[in-house]
Amino acid sequence: MSTNLTRTRRYVLAARPATTTGPIEDGVLRYEDDAPVPPIEDGQVLVKVEWLSLDVATRGWMNDVRNYLPPSPLGGAMRALGSGIVTGSRHKDFAVGDRVSGLVGWQEDAVVHGSTLSKVPDGVPLQAALHVLGISGQTAWLGLHDIGQPEPDETVVVTAAAGAVGSIAVQLAVAAGARVVGVAGTPQKCAFVRELGAVGCVNYREQDVAAAIAELAPDRVDVLFDNVGGAILDALLPHMAVNARVVLCGAVSRYDKSRGPVPLYNWFHLLPNRVRMEGFIYMDHKDRFAEIEADLLPRVRRGELRCQEHILDGLKAAPEGIQVLLSGSNNGKVLIRLGSD
Amino acid sequence: MSTNLTRTRRYVLAARPATTTGPIEDGVLRYEDDAPVPPIEDGQVLVKVEWLSLDVATRGWMNDVRNYLPPSPLGGAMRALGSGIVTGSRHKDFAVGDRVSGLVGWQEDAVVHGSTLSKVPDGVPLQAALHVLGISGQTAWLGLHDIGQPEPDETVVVTAAAGAVGSIAVQLAVAAGARVVGVAGTPQKCAFVRELGAVGCVNYREQDVAAAIAELAPDRVDVLFDNVGGAILDALLPHMAVNARVVLCGAVSRYDKSRGPVPLYNWFHLLPNRVRMEGFIYMDHKDRFAEIEADLLPRVRRGELRCQEHILDGLKAAPEGIQVLLSGSNNGKVLIRLGSD
């Protein structure tokens, strides 16, 4: 099956940014409003992209640094996760009209190999495949259950607790019977975190994090699910319980270089308290995604897993979306809604 | 069985130090050359102490801080591990002449409960129960095998590699088939580390640790067995391989407060490289000691596990020994040989 579509709009990665973190310069991304759509080759699928996921990883892919994936290639559409509708297919598993997600890139129409796509389950909005049932949900599940391993009645602290990953981690920890405390940056975010079932939420912009956690977690912290690193992580380390686990899920504090490197003074507390601190990358665990989705899907369908969506309209908003994400001024998952500009 | 001994020499912990780390003031320890030996009660054993073990933990026990043991009580002999000969016993498992080790304290004759003592195996020197077959060997074994888990041909870096724990960790890692690189503070210490089977040793006082490790471990570091923390740990973190393990065994860099707190700037590298960093305390694992001793004993008897001994003579040298240990100017295990002054 094929289509007559030959032109689309896209953002091409035209040059590497001057620095590996922080704002990107003019010229790194080139907007093209009349880019060619290549013919669909055997095994490939044409997707009309409806939603793009903006993630901290997106900024990393711009750099000439191999991380868990090679850099996003120069001259091609900027790499990104997204979801949409199949409009042409030469892959046996996909037909026109199928709802799919995958690494479609910053473009309105993407030709990708069918093996890189997943179908979005019935009864689930397309954009949920980018958060609760996608990278955010998988990340929260893996970090919380594989590394954090909270037991019922243990205390779990989640930082950036109103964010896409953080808010799902809060809900999964509450569902696991833990006592959950969030850390977030505004009263509105903290109110949302409490709505999700947290017993408390520290506003790090207005409160002393260490003092507030000492009050909210008097028996100390068994699991820290950390999305920010830096000063907040440092403030929490002395409050970890014996045999506690620190899940290093993200380090937003590091992505804006203008703040400078924020060191950990309190690393030493890991030793007498026998704390395990562990970093992880969700893409290492692709073989687990089906199992995790099977656990998450019924909860998503029942409306038990919520995620705030910070929606920007139109492909042209994508670069701005990255800055919003890295500055922490977003409310929840940053999504680009295509076709609406 | 009993004895007529009624007087001994000891160091009493007379006051808590003003600070929790660093040198101790006059008046913290009180030397008594005519202290009473209490009568041996049912279940107790009288030990003529021949060797005392000086450990980083010893300094910690002086503080009014519960760590993995409560503080050493004021007014009693300063807590310490030691080994010696049974000279009186009211415990069925011990007889006069038995060679034993345990928490005997800073005194020449100790009355302790038999349940707190272990017998020193035949064919093993009394002081070996304080290093290769005691706290140092157990610590190295637990940290290396339980947390570090080196595979054959993986690269293992050991800091303070000429020290009591470090040198045993080097030998155990070599025996496990790993490629071992040491970090130590003098050319003599480095020569000793290479003798133990390390392929290289970085002298951190003369070399740039990061550059030297990049050269000695071009495929990066799979296991870091760290005894020092601070700047050396920080220099090594960017060189950890994907899925590497950092064993936080000690933090000598933290014990001398005059140097000030040394932060970790490179904590962020734990995340993209999925590194696990974990603290542990050997005393948590008492249920494993018999199994570990069974593994170590034949190697000790065959002379395969060596440990340099830094011997100070006479009980009066014990406070000096603590300073030697914390300053890092010792060569190997710091021991006090009693009865020789």
Image (spheres, coloured by chain):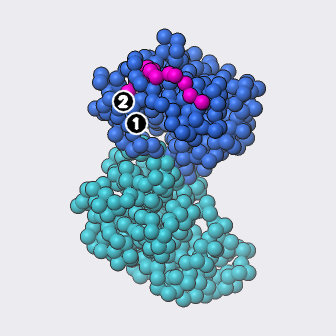
Chain colours: A cyan, B blue
A252 magenta-colored: no
B4 magenta-colored: yes
Residue B37 vs B277, above or below: the answer is: above
Question: Circle 2: is it few (<14), some (14-19), or many (20+) Cα within 10 Å?
Answer: many
Q: Position of residue A272 (x, y in %)?
A: 45, 44
The answer to which of A114 and B257 lies nearer the viewer is: B257
Q: Who's the residue at 64% across and 74% down the image?
A: A290
Residue A216 vs A94, above or below: the answer is: above
Q: Which residue is mark 1?
A: B72
The answer to which of B33 and B57 lies nearer the viewer is: B33
Q: Quarter of the image holding residue B179?
A: top right
Marks 2, 1 in one chain:
yes
In the image: residue A122, left or right of residue B122:
left
- Local secondary structure at mark 1: loop
Q: CA distance from mark 2 to mark 1?
A: 8 Å
Q: Position of residue A332 (x, y in %)?
A: 39, 72
* Residue B203 visible in image: no
Q: Who's the residue at 32% across and 29% down the image?
A: B14
Answer whether labels 2 and 1 touch (C-beta < 8 Å): yes
* Mark before the other along the chain sequence, 2 or 1: 2
- Local secondary structure at mark 2: strand
Residue A329 vs B326, above or below: the answer is: below
- Mark 1 is on which residue type? Ser
> Start and end of the magenta stretch?
B1-12
Q: Quarter of the image holding residue B190?
A: top right
Q: Position of residue A197 (x, y in %)?
A: 38, 76
Q: Which residue is mark 2?
A: B13
